[in-house]
C-alpha cells in the first residue's frame, strides 16, 4: 500500500461529529469528483465517481450521518485500464439530492447549480474545524502525497483555478504556503517542503501518518547530516593530502636543483622532516622540530619553500 493510500485510509475512518463539518467535507468531495444529472422531467440525481474505495466509503458515511440516507453504491470494472475499478455512489431521489446540494452550497436557493460546481460560498468554511474538514475532503477526492522515503510532494488536483485558489486560501489560514501549477488542463495545488506537508497532515487529522513521516524525516536529516560531515572531512583530508604532495614536490625540486645548503636552518629542518614524513600533519611536523613551533609557524616555512621552488621553476631549473 502506498503512503498516499495509507493517509487516505486513515482520513476515511475519521468522521467529524459536528454536522457543519460533515457537510463541509461532503461539499469538498462533491466539488472534486461529483456530478449532477438532470433528467427530462427536471429531476436531479447526484453521483460521485472515484477509483479510491476509501473515498467512496467516506462519502457514503457522511451521507448517512448528515442526512440519514442510504445511497446506492456500484462498482464498475474497466478491463482496458488494467482492470481498474471505479466506485460510483448515487443519490437518485430528487428531493434528497436537492437537500444535499442546498446544504453544501452547490445550489443556490433559487435552484441554480453553480456554474463550475465549485464551492465559492465561504459561509460553509468559516470555522477552522470546517476548513480542516473541507481540506480533508479535497485531499481524499483529488489529492496524493509521495512516499517520504523518496521525496516530499503533496498535491491536490482541481478542475478550475477558482477551486485551486480557494484551497490556497484555506491552507494559508493554517500558515501553510501552497503553490499552483497547470498540468493537463488541471490546476494542481502543491507543497514540496517536508515540514509544511507534516503541518498539512496535522490539519487534515492524519496523525498516524504524520508520526510516520516525522520519523522518516528525522532519520533522513540525521543521515544527511552525517553524510555532510563525512563529505566535509573527506574534502579536508583531500585538501591536506594535496597540499602535502605539493610540498614534497617543491622540496624535492629544491634538493635536486640547488640543494639545501643555501637554506636557513629552520627551512632546512622542515624540508628534511617533510620528506621523511610526507603524511604527517602540520601540527605533528611542528612538534618534531628541535625547537617546536605551532601549525602557523610550520605553514609559514613550507610556504617559503614553495616560493623558492616557484622561482626555480620560473628560471628553468
Image (cartoon, rainbow, N blue to C red):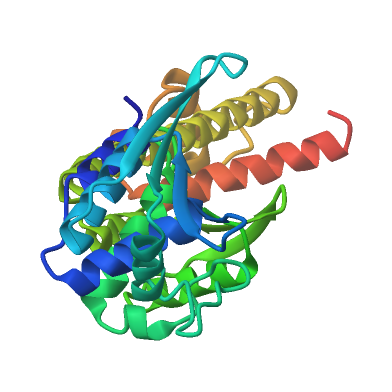
Residue located farthest toward the front when viewing the structure as drawn: 41
Is 98 placed left or right of 115 in the picture?
left
Q: Nearer the viewer, residue 177 or 71?
A: 71
Q: Quadrant of the N terminus?
A: top left
Residue located farthest toward the right when viewing the structure as drawn: 316
Q: Nearer the viewer, residue 67 or 176?
A: 67
Return the x and y of residue 62 as percentages of the image width and height: 23, 55
Is 51 placed left or right of 112 in the picture?
left
Is 19 placed left or right of 299 in the picture?
left
Q: Nearer the viewer, residue 199 or 103?
A: 103
Q: Residue at x 64, y 25 (%)?
A: 249
Q: Nearer the viewer, residue 10 or 208?
A: 10
Q: Looking at the image, can residue 36 be seen?
A: yes
Q: Residue at x 16, y 51 (%)?
A: 14
Q: Looking at the image, can residue 289 be seen?
A: no
Quadrant of residue 200 in the image? bottom left
Amino acid at each position: 500500500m502506498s503512503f498516499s493510500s495509507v493517509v487516505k485510509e486513515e482520513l476515511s475512518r475519521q468522521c467529524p461529529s459536528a454536522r457543519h463539518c460533515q457537510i463541509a467535507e461532503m461539499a469538498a468531495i462533491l466539488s472534486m469528483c461529483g456530478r449532477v444529472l438532470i433528467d427530462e422531467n427536471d429531476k436531479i440525481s447526484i453521483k460521485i465517481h472515484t477509483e479510491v474505495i476509501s473515498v467512496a466509503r467516506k462519502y457514503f458515511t457522511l451521507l448517512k450521518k448528515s442526512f440519514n440516507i442510504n445511497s446506492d453504491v456500484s462498482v464498475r470494472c474497466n478491463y482496458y485500464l488494467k482492470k481498474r475499478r471505479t466506485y460510483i455512489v448515487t443519490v437518485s431521489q430528487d428531493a434528497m439530492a436537492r437537500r444535499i446540494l442546498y446544504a453544501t452550497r452547490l445550489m443556490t436557493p433559487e435552484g441554480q447549480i453553480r456554474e463550475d460546481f465549485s464551492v465559492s460560498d465561504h459561509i460553509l468554511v468559516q470555522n477552522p474545524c470546517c476548513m480542516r474538514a473541507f481540506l480533508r475532503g479535497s485531499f481524499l477526492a483529488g489529492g496524493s502525497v509521495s512516499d517520504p522515503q523518496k521525496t516530499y510532494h503533496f498535491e491536490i488536483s482541481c478542475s478550475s483555478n477558482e477551486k485551486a485558489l480557494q484551497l490556497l486560501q484555506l491552507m494559508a489560514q493554517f500558515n501553510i504556503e501552497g503553490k499552483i501549477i497547470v498540468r493537463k488542463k488541471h490546476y494542481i495545488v502543491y507543497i514540496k517542503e517536508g515540514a509544511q506537508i507534516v503541518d498539512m497532515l496535522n490539519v487534515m487529522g492524519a496523525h498516524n501518518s504524520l508520526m510516520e513521516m516525522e520519523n522518516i524525516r528525522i532519520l533522513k536529516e540525521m543521515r544527511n547530516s552525517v553524510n555532510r560531515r563525512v563529505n566535509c572531512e573527506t574534502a579536508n583530508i583531500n585538501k591536506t593530502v594535496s597540499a602535502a604532495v605539493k610540498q614534497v614536490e617543491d622540496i624535492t625540486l629544491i634538493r635536486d636543483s640547488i640543494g639545501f645548503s643555501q637554506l636557513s636552518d629552520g627551512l632546512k629542518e622542515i624540508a628534511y622532516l617533510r620528506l621523511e614524513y610526507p603524511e604527517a600533519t602540520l601540527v605533528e611536523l611542528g612538534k618534531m622540530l628541535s625547537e617546536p613551533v605551532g601549525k602557523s609557524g610550520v605553514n609559514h616555512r613550507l610556504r617559503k619553500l614553495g616560493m623558492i621552488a616557484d622561482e626555480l621553476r620560473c628560471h628553468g631549473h
